[in-house]
Amino acid sequence: MTRLSQGEYFDELVQRTASYQSSADYLETLRVVAALKDFSPFNAYLLRLQRPNLRFAARLERWHYEFGRQLRQDRPAYPLVILRPFGPVDFVFDYDDTDGYPLPLSVLEPYRASGYISRETWERLFHNARRRGVLVEFRGGEFGEAGSIGLFSTPFQLPKAATRSVREEPPVRFRVSLSSLSREVQFTTLLHELGHLCCGHLGGLPGDDWPNRERLPPTVVEFEAESVSFIVGRRLGLESNAEEYLAGYAARGEVVPQGVSVHTVLKAAGLIEEWASKLTFPRKPRREKAERQLRSKREGLLAGDNL
């Protein structure tokens, strides 16, 4: 019997729930994930699973110091579990389990979209994509689609700048083409195309931060990319056609396409949101280097014990 990976095991559990099978419930779940911006998409999904009617959640100290609220005394309050960086877990509490001052409107109505993307956010996403071997190009009005992403048949290195940076950019492996639309439309289109990349639809190498999931059915590929675009766009305050695409499934009463990986969608959304938030370098090579150094250190200690 083949052993499932963590992602496969998570997806297998999710596929047994009604929130996965119904496209309407799936879309509502994505809306909640997009609204809970203080948590990673993955943790927001975990909160939704534990408390389907969740409005807002926070750690106990944040409720007290930032919002002037405390746990209700008239009934038991049950903590919700989320994953913590460098773990294992952390606990947060639902808004309905607290009493005190009313919450700001910006907290109670997180679905509001500004429809504006800053130049800094755009440039961070652009440069972080380039650091992963993605070249973003802009086409004129004759370009039929809003955008597309594809592989270069032969990866190539862009000409180096006059001043060498601390880290050289990797060879170009992927090309994203964007039409000459508004910056907001270009940005949401770029989110969609990077969604394909980070869901592994174009394949992946051992050093990439995304999996290798080539040769999936077109319906699965588009559904996952639209899901990623919707989550990240909403969390950054943008509206896009992604919600209309997903709502179409719900309006027709269709189920989520077989093979869609919720685990992959959430991880991809978190990765792209991070790219739009700060300049980073690929995680996996750094992580693998740290693991090699740790193994080497352990081997050295063991060798010393044997002397």
Image (cartoon, grey):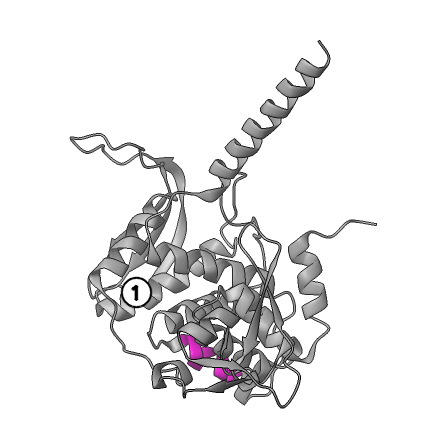
Please say if 305 is above or below 39: above
**Is residue 145 visible from the viewing direction of this image?**
no
Q: Which residues are magenta?
A: 242-249
The answer to whether residue 242 is left or right of residue 87 is: left
Q: Quadrant of the C terminus?
A: top right
The single residue placed furthest to the front in the displayed view is 73
Write the residue at 51% across / 32% down. 289
- Find residue 265 and report its horizontal and vertical position in percent: 53, 63
The single residue placed furthest to the right in the displayed view is 1
Residue 245 lies in the magenta-colored region: yes
Q: 181 or 210, which lies in front?
A: 210
Q: 136 or 161, which lies in front?
A: 161
Instruction: Please give the residue where the numbered disc 1 appears in the rendered image.
Output: 187
- Find residue 182 and report its horizontal and vertical position in percent: 21, 70
Please say if 18 is above or below 161: below
Circle 1 sits in a helix, a strand or a loop, which is it? helix
The single residue placed furthest to the left in the displayed view is 162
Please say if 48 is above or below 162: below
Write the residue at 50% across / 66% down. 41
The quarter of the displayed image where residue 37 is located: bottom left
Q: 88 or 157, which lies in front?
A: 88
**Is residue 140 visible from the viewing direction of this image?**
yes
Write the residue at 68% across / 69% down. 14
Q: Main secondary structure of the magenta part?
A: helix
Residue 100 lies in the magenta-colored region: no
- Find residue 3 and report its horizontal and vertical position in percent: 77, 49
